[in-house]
Amino acid sequence: MNAYAVIETGGEQLRVEPGRFYDVRHFASLNPENLGPNSKILIYRVLMICDESTINIGHPWLKGAMIKGRILHSRLDNKITVYRMRSKKKTRRKLGHRQKLIRFVVDSICSDVKDLYKQKD
């Protein structure tokens, strides 16, 4: 079983592992237009770190724990269609929406400023 962590970002909780990439809606207090490819990011909202033998759970977050990663690129999610119709009023409205996403890769999981789990190359 590989080491993993549970983080909170973009209004959702993600289970992340080193070496894998993830799509999130937005990062708190970061503007996606200012973040280019290969920008380094640090995520401090780590809820849990688990390895082969131990599980560390924070209340609400772990102190001294962080996730190091880098941004691969920004992209748009699949289009959703919103169709509103009011019966007996002859009113119809069709809209579409594409959510902006940021794809990032996790390089390492750190606890107390030590790299515990690095990406396997």
Image (cartoon, rainbow, N blue to C red):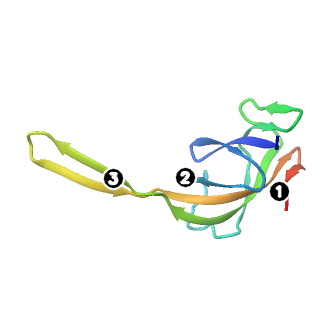
> Mark 1 and mark 3: span between their CA atoms?
38 Å
Q: Quadrant of residue 50?
A: top right
Q: Is residue 77 left or right of residue 5?
A: left
Mark carried by residue 100 = none
Earlier-in-chain disc, 3 versus 2: 2
Check disc 3 and give the amino acid type: Thr
Q: Amino acid at mark 2?
A: Arg
- Work out whether residue 99 or residue 63 is closer to the camera in this orientation and state it: 99
Q: Nearer the viewer, residue 2 or 4?
A: 2
Earlier sequence position, callout 2 versus callout 1: 2
Corner quadrant of residue 7: top right
Q: CA distance from mark 2 to mark 1?
A: 24 Å
Residue reaching furthest bottom?
37
Please identify the quadrant where the N terminus is shown. top right
Question: Which of the marked residues, 1 or 3, is nearer the chain's N terminus?
Answer: 3
Residue 20, x across and y down, in percent: 72, 55
Decide if residue 6 is on the left or right side of residue 118: left
Question: Is 96 or 111 nearer to us in this picture?
Answer: 96
The residue singled out by tag 1 in the image is: 119
Residue 103's quadrant in the figure?
bottom right
The picture places residue 87, in percent across and down from the top left corner, at 13, 39
Instruction: Kindly indicate whether the residue at mark 1 contacts the one at mark 2 (C-beta within 8 angstroms).
Output: no
Image position of 22 with respect to 46: above or below: below
Residue at (31, 50) in percent of width and height: 82
Q: Amino acid at mark 1?
A: Gln
Disc 3 crowd, CA 10 A, few/some/many (<14, 14-19, 20+): few
Residue 97 screen position, x and y as percent? 38, 56
Tell me how far mark 3 sits from mark 2, CA to CA. 18 Å
Above/below status of 46 relative to 121: above
Camera-near label (2 vs 1) is 1
Q: Which residue is mark 2?
A: 25
Q: Which mark is residue 81?
A: 3
